[in-house]
Image (tube, rainbow, N blue to C red):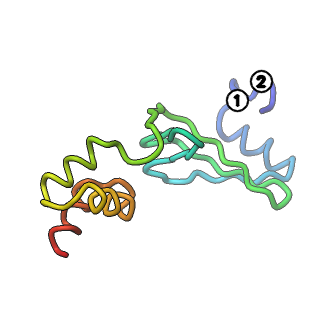
Amino acid sequence: MFPGMGRMNPKQMQSMLKQFGIKSEEIKARRVVFELEDERIIIDNPSVTAMDMQGQKIYSVMGTERKEKAGIPEDDVAMVAEQTGKTKAEAKKALVETDGDIAEAILKLKSD
């Protein structure tokens, strides 16, 4: 963002950002997910900083990424269908409704 900032200590950086009218805060996030057209980028236990510049928020995310294909994997659909005795269509619907959470989808279908 700004040249040479990597060598500053956090207090110096906060002071400099404040001089530019930039407010920053750490956000305690467990996971950040970027949903792209054909895949998802997931960052677990990220370091997230939000900066407010003239009413606009800028989020800085650092961490190790993992990628997933978009949509619900067919293996997950088959597993949920097998575990619940429901059709693959019902299993896929439950997975979509539970954001891909296999355990929650199974519980949801077993309670129906």
Graded by Cα atoms within 10 Å as few (under 14), some (14 to 19) or many (20 or more), the crowding at tag 2 reads few
In the displayed structure, does residue 91 sit left or right of residue 22?
left
Residue 94 image point, x, y percent:
31, 63
Residue located 77% across and 45% down the image: 15
Please name the residue that numbered disc 1 is placed on: 8
Residue 100 against residue 70 in the figure, above or below: below
Look at the image and tell me in which quarter the N terminus lies: top right
Residue located 64% across and 42% down the image: 60
Indicate the amino acid at tag 1: Met
Please name the residue that numbered disc 2 is placed on: 4
Residue 12 against residue 89 in the figure, above or below: above
In the displayed structure, does residue 76 sit left or right of residue 32?
left
Residue 110 image point, x, y percent:
15, 68
In the displayed structure, does residue 38 sit left or right of residue 101?
right
Residue 9 image point, x, y percent:
66, 32
Residues under numbered marks 2 and 1 in contact, where contact means CB atoms less than 8 Å apart: yes
* Disc 2/disc 1 C-alpha distance (Å): 7 Å
